[in-house]
Image (tube, helix red, strand yellow):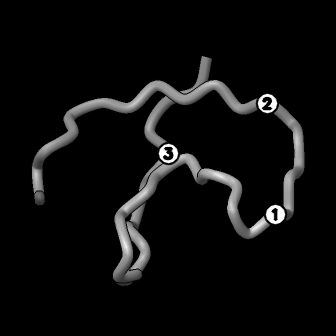
Amino acid sequence: KAGLVDELSLLHYPVIDGAASSPTIFEQGEQPGPPAQLKLRHVE
């Protein structure tokens, strides 16, 4: 899966939902893995 995404546009909406069944921004399936390292490159 490395190199699969070139660019990501994300609109952050300030709402908190702590339910365990709530979907997250990025779902990866049943088996959790190490977190992806993201780097902020640009803000408008």
x then y, percent, for residue 34: 38, 83
Left or right: 29 in relation to 14:
left
Q: Pick the quarter of the image with the N terminus.
A: bottom left
Q: Secondary structure at mark 1?
A: loop
Residue position for label 1: 19
The residue that appears at 44% across and 39% down in the rendered structure is: 41
Which image quarter: residue 11?
Answer: top right
Residue position for label 3: 40
Left or right: 14 in relation to 38:
right
Q: Name above or below for residue 44 compared with residue 43.
A: above
For the residue marked with disc 1, what is the amino acid? Ala
| Marks 3 and 1, the one that precedes in the sequence | 1
For the residue marked with disc 3, what is the amino acid? Leu
Q: Residue furthest front?
A: 21
Q: Secondary structure at mark 2?
A: loop
The residue that appears at 30% across and 30% down in the rendered structure is: 7
Cα distance between the residues tagged 3 and 1: 28 Å
| Marks 3 and 2, the one that precedes in the sequence | 2
Which image quarter: residue 38?
Answer: bottom left
For the residue marked with disc 2, what is the amino acid? Tyr
Cα distance between the residues tagged 1 and 2: 17 Å
The residue that appears at 35% across and 67% down in the rendered structure is: 29
| Marks 1 and 2, the one that precedes in the sequence | 2
Q: Are marks 3 and 1 in contact (CB under 8 Å)?
A: no
x then y, percent, for residue 22: 70, 55
Q: Nearer the viewer, mark 1 or mark 2?
A: 1
Residue position for label 2: 13
Q: Name above or below for residue 16 compared with residue 5.
A: below
Q: Nearer the viewer, mark 3 or mark 2?
A: 2
